[in-house]
Image: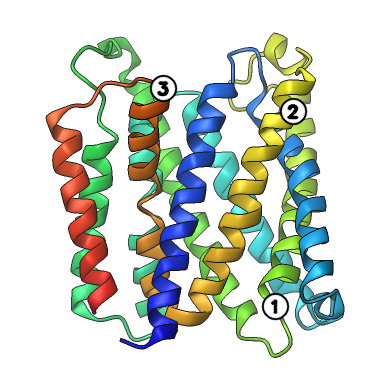
Amino acid sequence: MTSSEIFGIILAFSAACCWGSAGVLYKGTIQAKHSLFLSIVYRGMIAVPFLALLTMLTTGFEALSILLHLDVLPILLFSSLFVTLGDLFFFASLQKIEVSKSQPVASMYPLFTIVLLIFFGVEQVSLVVIIATIILIIGIGLVSQKNHSSREPSSSKEVNINKGLMLSIVAAIFWSFGILTLDHLLEIPGVDVFSLATIRFAILTVLMALSWLVFDKYHLGSIDKARSHTPISRRDILLFGVTGILSWGIGAVTFFTSIELIGTSRATPISSINPLIAVILGIIFLKEKFSPLQALGILLVCFGSILISIF
């Protein structure tokens, strides 16, 4: 294994840590009165200027002219649209089912990514990577299981549960397409990860703002009208911005760089251990309970990550 591959694996793990940390911080901040969509817009309003400053201090904005070229712009727009749709479907699923059910299903995006990579012939995917990805998905599912003390939904909500799970699956599929288009954009000569992250998440923020206006106006996705119009405090806006910097700023840049170094088929599964990071941090900082199933899930996630790192 070369030094660049080791560095790429470290960056993929770093992205997972950033995303997991952001998830815990977001969970500790979000309240029932907050609009999930509007909070994402606030994340972008703080994270995108941070990314722009980071781009200016590192690579500069020369790559923006390449990304805005007529031959590249449609791919960039599709990439941002896929991620936006993935986020929208994921948060719509949260309106119907618990995070403990939605998050593991939505974390299946590495499996869909590998299927798409094989279908389109983008990369050579080994059998070991496929097996490790399946192990990761099983582990993530176990890690995200609820404790026995949690309250289970009644049987009358079975229809909503099925709809929520389907929405999570659709979110994972859209995220997979977003990763594939991202891989194509990073192969374009002159495109750097900082400029790509800046403009991609700027487009995503605009799309999310427009989507929130539509959802708010027509009350789609079971959004509570009173919650949508409840002001968000400055403290919460700042915390939403910090989660944006962690996930869209540092996390995205490290993930993009890891894709350049070790490829999509290896970086994506490693980055998908972010629910594991969230569980560990949740136990430490949010005093969440730890179950035997979560312990088994942690072992499976670690084992799957080691397989991908070695092979």
Q: Position of residue 26 (x, y in %)?
A: 56, 31
Q: Position of residue 234 (x, y in %)?
A: 79, 22
User: SS for tag 2?
Assistant: helix
C-beta proximity under 8 Å, tags 2 and 1 = no
In this view of the protein, which residue sits in the foreground, 264 or 160?
264
Which amino acid, by three-letter code, is at mark 2? Ile
Q: Quadrant of the C terminus?
A: bottom left
> Residue at coordinates 52% horizontally, 23% vertically from top-left?
28
Which quadrant of the structure image shows residue 186?
Answer: bottom right
Residue assigned mark 1: 192
Q: CA distance from mark 3 to mark 2?
A: 20 Å
The image's mark for residue 286 is: 3
Would residue 31 be found to the left or right of residue 150 on screen? right
Categorize mark 1 by other alpha carbons within 10 Å: few (<14), some (14-19), many (20+): many
Residue 266 vs 165, above or below: the answer is below
User: SS for tag 3?
Assistant: loop
Which amino acid, by three-letter code, is at mark 3? Leu
**Could one spot residue 112 in this view of the protein?**
no
Residue assigned mark 2: 237
Q: Position of residue 11 (x, y in %)?
A: 47, 66
